[in-house]
Amino acid sequence: MKFSIITPVRNSMDTIKDTIASILSQRHGNIEYIVIDGASTDGTIDVVKRYGDRISTFISEPDEGIYDAINKGISKATGDIVGILNADDFYVHDHVISQVEETFLSHKKQAVFADVRFVPRDNLEKTVRYYSSANFSPKKFRWGFMPAHPTFFTYRSNYLTYGLYKTDYQIAADYELLIRFLYTYKLTFAYLPQAIIKMRLGGVSTRSIRSNYILNKEIVRACAENGIYTNMFFLSLKYFVKIKELVRTRNE
């Protein structure tokens, strides 16, 4: 199987090298790596260019945000399977893609996802939150739960058939796409029971109370557009689970 891994980036000079290294070190022999840069001004472009033709496709131009960048990457992809790895994130070991491929082949499903470890920006070995996708089911979208989006892999043909990310969402286009794929169009999925990605803290959806409000408001919209009823109260209950994730981390 050929994998297309897409990294959307803008002004991530200090972290993009870890992302790139984690992909180029993968032992899987058939990876197409696509980097879509939103006209960075901080030296990110120079960092990416150092890797030369080891990066299959590199585009740097103004865009409409992260989801527009991802859509550009998907449009350039030629692999069987598409995965997305943001410029603050990196794979935890060098056989992640091989394990994802094995999961596709052994389970015969349309999508695969796994778990994520959140780490501080100044200590990549310390896990401060463990996001498990183990108990996900499509009915949980109503309550604000989704599988860890950074670990989501699916066939490129599904994007061609069921659509790309909606760029009129500020934060929750990933939530809407997962609802559309896994709930509305009922793509089958398999869970890989391990953390395959480390994410640095400080993402768009966790920066402030206002960001969380926008996120939840967009989740309500995403659910409504796909025939699921929810409301802000239902979504507020998910924060009790997030507390459990922090407690679990401290007890590991």
Image (cartoon, rainbow, N blue to C red):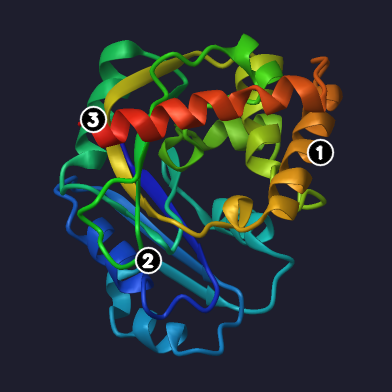
Q: Residue at x 63, y 60 (%)?
A: 66
Check disc 1 and report its element: helix, strand or loop. Answer: helix
Residue 113 seen from this side: no
Q: Is residue 44 above or below residue 159?
A: below
* Amino acid at the residue labelled 3: Asn
User: Are the two marked residues, 1 and 2, in contact with CB atoms closer than 8 angstroms?
Assistant: no
Which quarter of the figure has residue 15?
bottom left
Q: Quadrant of the N terminus?
A: top left
Within-10-Å neighbours for mark 2: few <14, some 14–19, many 20+: some
Q: Position of residue 40 (x, y in %)?
A: 56, 83
Give the mark toward the camera: 1 or 3: 3
Q: Which disc is residue 54 wearing?
A: none
Which numbered disc flags the more N-terminal residue, 1 or 2?
Answer: 2
Q: Label 2 belongs to which residue? A: 56
Whether 77 is drawn above or below 252: the answer is below
In this view of the protein, which residue sits in the foreground, 46 or 160? 46
Q: Which residue is found at the position 37% from the left and 78% from the top?
A: 14
Cα gap from disc 1 to disc 2, whole angstroms: 37 Å
Q: Position of residue 61 (x, y in %)?
A: 63, 79
Residue at x 55% of width, y 25% of height = 240
Question: Between 71 and 56, which is closer to the camera in this rendering?
Answer: 71
Identify the mark at residue 251; answer none if there is no mark. Answer: 3
Q: Secondary structure at mark 2?
A: loop
- Residue ID at (62%, 62%): 69
Q: Which numbered disc, 3 or 2, marks the residue that appears first in the sequence? A: 2
Q: CA distance from mark 1 to mark 3?
A: 33 Å
User: Circle 1 sits on which residue?
Assistant: 217
